[in-house]
Image (cartoon, rainbow, N blue to C red):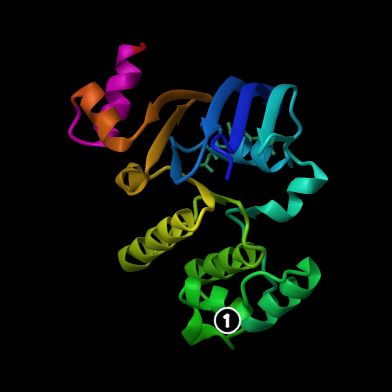
Amino acid sequence: MMNNQIEVRDLVVVRGGREVLPGISLDVGAGVTGLLGPSGCGKSTLLRAIVGVQQVRSGSVTVGGEPAGSRGLRDRIGYVTQAASVYDDLSVVENLKFFARVLGTPGRGVDDVIDAVDLGDHRDAVVGNLSGGQRSRASLAVALLGEPDLLVLDEPTVGLDPVLRRDLWALFHRLADDGTAVLVSSHVMDEADRCDRLLLMREGRIIADGAPDEIRRRTAAADIEQAFLAIVEESA
Ligand SMILES: Nc1ncnc2c1ncn2[C@@H]1O[C@H](COP(=O)(O)OP(=O)(O)OP(=O)(O)O)[C@@H](O)[C@H]1O
């Protein structure tokens, strides 16, 4: 796999008449990368630009050397938004069989992805009757069907209990070990230590970039929340 899977250069995105991303640059490579920042700082907008569904004003975004959104990338990127992308009136297994057919995926089997997201006990449950967390795991299972090179996950652990959160992070690391680059956004700073690398974001800019312990050491902070505050104060 390529080292610099994602390259973002001087990216400007305007939403609602405001520069939400005022010229952001970053690289994302292998492993599990966490994009952390407060609500509204532009995480979803950046992820949308990376998967090629966001209109951009200027700058560039490439994935594996190809412009974001290009046809050749479609099968190589799995993207899970905060809104579930599965059908409420179908069961978990029916949804996955449907998407496997639509995507024409020879990749992982339906049962493998159901097990990977730990929905085996709810295989035949209608998605409309599942909890929010279970529904978002069903969406994640769909994204895993194609065995993507890059998995982009927008706040996948919101609303999940601690056990499920731990299990999902373990899954992200297993996928990363198998060669999938995983980019995960979160506004919960206590998830920072679960990442190989962090991008701390504030007001449309990256304010820190490095391994969690590196960032803590650099700022002499006890945790990433403190580090974030220290960096904000430094730059004030
Ligand atoms: N459809 C839209 N039209 C206009 N402005 C928008 C739209 N979507 C988002 N914004 C604005 O863009 C900014 C960044 O939003 P974005 O969703 O990228 O943030 P975020 O960091 O992902 O937040 P959260 O953690 O709450 O999801 C916000 O100020 C928001 O108000």
Q: Where is residue 125 in the image (x, y as percent from the top left)?
A: 58, 86
In the displayed orientation, state which residue is furthest to the front: 1
| Dominant SS in magenta | helix
Looking at the rendering, the stretch of residues picked out in magenta corresponds to: 221-234
32 or 42, nearer to the observer: 32
Residue 159 located left or right of residue 189? right
Q: What residue type is labelled 1?
A: Asp
- Mark 1 closeness class: few <14, some 14–19, many ≥20 residues within 10 Å: some
In the displayed structure, 199 sits above or below 85; it is: above
Q: In which quarter of the image is ligand 1?
A: top right
Q: What element carries label 1?
A: helix
Q: Nearer the viewer, residue 88 or 55?
A: 55
* Residue under pointer 1: 111
User: Looking at the picture, does residue 63 appear above or below residue 233?
Assistant: below
Give the quadrant of residue 63: top right
Q: Residue at x 47, y 53 (%)?
A: 176
Q: Position of residue 155 (x, y in %)?
A: 49, 50
Location of the C terminus by quadrant is top left
Q: Quadrant of the N terminus?
A: top right
Q: How many marks?
A: 1
